[in-house]
Amino acid sequence: MGNVKKVAKCKNITFRAMWKHRWIYLMLVPVVAYYIIFKYVPMYGIVMAFQDYNVFQGVFGSQWVGFEVFNRIFHNPNFWAAVKNTLVLNILTLAVTFPLTIIVALMLNEIMSAKFKKVTQSILYLPHFVSWVVVAGIATNMFAQRDGTINILLNAVGVDSIPFLSSNSWWIFTYVIANVWKEIGWGTIIYLAALTNVDESLYEAAYLDGATKFQRLIYITLPSIKSVVVTMLILQVSKMMTIGLDAPLLLGNDKVSGVSEVISTYVYRLGIENARYSDSTAIGLFQSVVNIIILLAADKFAKAIGEEGII
């Protein structure tokens, strides 16, 4: 009887707290509805990965084949080539973008003029909102071998044209550079927010002790945002098997298909061009499972070195 009263009392307190902040909870309704409608409801389509899906019979009428679809894609060398290219591009992009994002955030944090800082931030944020269609057009105009801006300048000083978009290694370089230019400014937002929480008294004490600006950066600033850096790294690492469709599809071409054919473009060709919906669904499910495993492993590693992790 006592337990029943405690439960009822807790429910009453919870209801009163929710009613008190009802307008805040009301603001959550569109977000919750979005995730339910567009994220959770479509998840029933995962069953296509275990079916010989027929678009006319639908999900509930198609024949079940178990793991036959997975067996087929795992024995396809093109699939593993796409996995390899995805990992290579993601690892290289992360290796370049992640430290540069932190460095840019630290540099922005040191700008004393508020007006100049806002202008600089706006310029750095702007590429994030530019469509990849536009970015690909800019990259093509800049890196084209015959009439690209960079090669024209190189030719003017006696240097041979570089095949940025038709050589595998140079294409990877171009892809990474385009991603850095587009996303590096946007990635600084969280680090700048974390830097605002660093205790100013620590800087003052270090300054009085004779610490240089670089020493204050190394021994105060970076340790103060270490938890944020680790959290962001875990989140980035957990997306190693996921890559956007736009950049590889728009920047790629037949000459560099050996490095530009990634999982997203492979799924696009299977599902949209060849109507092999079961195969594309199975690959998408495989991606999600691998990403979850990587996330759990990265989180466990972070905890093993003394960080809190995210789970």
Image (spheres, rainbow, N blue to C red):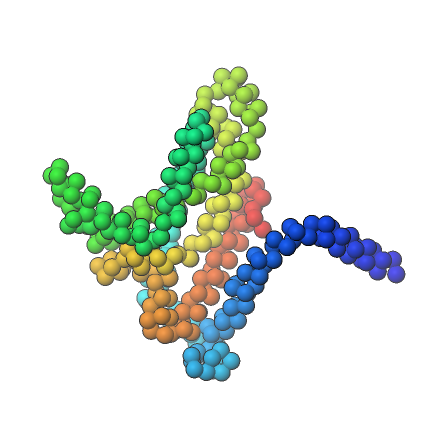
Q: Among all residues in the image, which is located at the extreme left?
A: 158
**Picture quadrant of residue 87:** bottom left
Residue at the extreme right = 1
Say above or below: 82 vs 169.
below
In front of the other: 187 or 30 = 30
Note whether 231 is above or below 106 in the view shown: below
Position of residue 21 measured from the top left corner of the image (x, y, whole percent): 69, 49
Residue 155 position in % (x across, y down): 13, 42
Q: Residue at x 32, y 55 (%)?
A: 133
Using the image, determine if residue 10 lies above or below residue 224: below
Which is nearer the eye, 151 or 89?
151
The residue at the point 36 percent across, 70 percent down is 272
Q: How many dots with numbers?
A: 0
- Give me the residue at 79% from left, 55% from top: 12
Q: Quadrant of the N terminus?
A: bottom right
In this rendering, the answer to whether 28 lies above or below 308 is below
Image coordinates for residue 120, horizontal then vertical, percent:
39, 35
Q: Which x, y percent locates residue 123? A: 37, 39
Single out the residue that lies furthest toward the front.
Answer: 23
Q: From this viewpoint, is residue 259 visible?
A: no
Residue at x-position 36% and y-position 45%: 127
| Residue 121 in sight in this render | yes
